[in-house]
Structure formats: structure tokens, C-alpha cells
Image: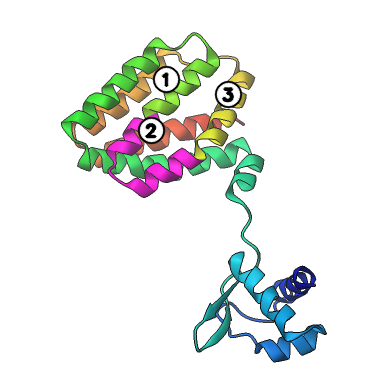
Amino acid sequence: MAEQAAELLLGRVRDGEWELGQKLPGEVTLASQMGVGRSTAREAIRILAGKGVLASRQGSGVYLTALDVREEWDAVLGRAEIRSVIEARTAIETEAARLAALRRSPAELRAVRRALDDRAARRDGLEDHVDADTAFHRSIVLASGNPVLTGMFDRFTPRMREAMVEMLRRRGEFGDDGDQQAHADMVEAVAAKDPEAAARLSREHLAALAAGLE
């Protein structure tokens, strides 16, 4: 009954009955409107609070905090098209490159250079190359010193890997000298502590990937 009541209540939210941030009627009123007992209405509210739709504020009431149920992040990523993956990479990696140029330590720069050399050495097998490429870009994200960007990158990595393998398989070629040089240029911008160049080179690299989809 509580699950059914939660679905009914969620339907009213989706229909726009309340605005974001608005206080909902009390449990007694909601129970009466849904034709259930007060305990069932309370449980329905608890279910939707657990899904991020409602929030109970002590001594104040229940408020609408989202207009729909949060979809599981992994499910969203699993359905993402390659173009969407590249756009998300651009958002994360361009800022990470800019910050890395500002904040990188000597040890982090050495790690970035090692990752670049490893990427250059692993250009024979497609999947092995994608893994080396991912490790390279992660080294720059780590050098940004922003744990949120690192966490986003790590959570994003499995779908990103799938997308890159799929894209390069379609293209039929990968890891040429021009591509490796583009990554080397990015490293030199980080080494030179030039945030604008680092961000621009990161953006241009990913824009070229996106253009290859057309």
C-alpha cells in the first residue's frame, strides 16, 4: 500500500501540483486525498524522501525538493551516446587541465609525463591504447588537485572507456603521431603553468574527437 501511495503521490508531483520548494499538505490531508491511512501516507512520504523527491523538516513539514525521482547515475551513463560522453569529458577535463597548470606539483608533473610516455608505447592494441589514454587524462585530473573532479572522472571512466573503444573501432585508426603530439602539447602547457593554453588544448582535442563522429 505504501509503495502504491508513493507512486500516486509521485504522479501528482510530476503533474505539477506543487512547485519546487513548496510545502505539501499534512499527512492527514494527504492520507484523506489518497484514500489511505495516515501511517501509509507517512510511509509513502518516507519512500519519496529516500528518492530525493521530498524532504521532511523537523517542526515545519514536508517540502518538494525534486520534480521527479533521481535516476541511478550508472543507468544514465549506460545509455549515454558517444557524443554526450565526449561533451561530459570536455566539461571535466578542460577545467582539470586548467587547474593542473595552476596547481601541479613537480611530482604530479612527473606522473603526467610518465603517463604520456606509456600512452606513446601502447599504440598497438586498441583497448590497451584506450586504457593508456584514460590513465594519461586521469593523471592530469589528479594534478588539478580537485577531488570532486577526480571523483567524477573515476565514476565516469567505465562508460567513457566503452565509448572510446566503440568510437575508435568505428574509425579504424588510433594513436597516430599527430594525436600523440596533441597530448604532448597539453603536457607542455601544464608544465609551463599556462592554464589558458592547457584548457584550450584539452578542448581542441576533445572537439576533434566529436568532429570525427560527423
Inter-mark Cα distance, 1 to 3: 16 Å
* Picture coordinates of residue 161, whole percent (x, y): 54, 29
User: How has the structure been colored for display?
Assistant: rainbow
Question: Looking at the image, which residue is at 65% across and 63% down?
Answer: 69
Inter-mark Cα distance, 2 to 3: 17 Å
Can you name the residue that lies furthest to the front here?
39
SS at mark 1 in the image: helix
* Picture coordinates of residue 103, whole percent (x, y): 21, 42
Please name whichever residue, 123 or 194, is drawn nearer the observer in this view of the structure: 123
Question: Looking at the image, which residue is at 21% across and 42% down?
Answer: 102
Q: Is residue 145 above or below residue 130?
A: below
- Of labels 2 and 1, earlier in sequence is 2
Of labels 1 and 3, the one closer to you = 3
SS at mark 2 in the image: helix
The majority secondary structure of the magenta stretch comes to: helix
In the picture of the structure, the residue carrying the numbered disc 1 is 179
Inter-mark Cα distance, 2 to 1: 17 Å
* Picture coordinates of residue 141, whole percent (x, y): 35, 38
Residue type (three-letter) at the residue carrying disc 3: Val
SS at mark 3 in the image: helix
Give the quarter of the image for residue 66.
Answer: bottom right
Residue type (three-letter) at the residue carrying disc 1: Asp
In the picture of the structure, the residue carrying the numbered disc 3 is 165
